[in-house]
Image: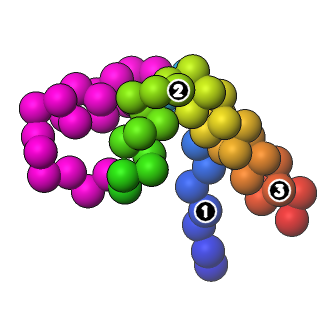
């Protein structure tokens, strides 16, 4: 038996909160596991990053539900 966790719409709606928490952590911690490319996107294109992440999550959820 295999279980796959899919982010629900409710979870997806929490993304802005989670992303702001990440940004807060970036501000106060120089040692971060967040890749440089993502850090730059969060600093320069927050809305674009958030929307692209939402789209990617939806596509993955839809693909997994089709199988």
Left or right for 23, reference 13: left
Q: Which mark is residue 45?
A: 2
Camera-side residue of 65 and 44: 44
Local secondary structure at mark 3: helix
Specify the quadrant of the image occupied by residue 49.
top right
> For the residue carrying disc 1, how many other residues have a C-alpha within 10 Å: few (<14), some (14-19), or many (20+)?
few
Tell me, for residue 4, which label it has, or none: 1
Residue 38: give x, y in percent of width and height: 44, 46
Left or right side of 52 for 35? left
Residue 60 x, y percent position in the rendering? 73, 53
Q: Main secondary structure of the magenta part?
A: helix
Q: Secondary structure at mark 2?
A: loop
Residue 26 sits inside the magenta stretch: yes
Residue 66 screen position, x and y as percent? 89, 57
What stretch of residues is rendered in magenta? 16-34
Q: Alpha carbon of mark 2 to alpha carbon of mark 1: how far?
A: 31 Å
Q: Which mark is residue 63?
A: 3
x 57%, y 55%: residue: 5
Q: Residue at x 59, y 66 (%)?
A: 3
* Quadrant in the rendering for residue 21: top left
């Amino acid at each position: 038996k295999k279980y796959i966790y899919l982010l629900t719409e409710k979870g997806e709606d929490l993304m802005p909160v989670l992303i702001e928490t990440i940004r807060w952590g970036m501000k106060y911690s120089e040692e971060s596991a967040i890749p440089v490319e993502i850090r730059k996107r969060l600093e320069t294109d927050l809305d674009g990053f958030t929307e692209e992440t939402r789209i990617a999550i939806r596509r993955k959820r839809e693909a997994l539900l089709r199988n």
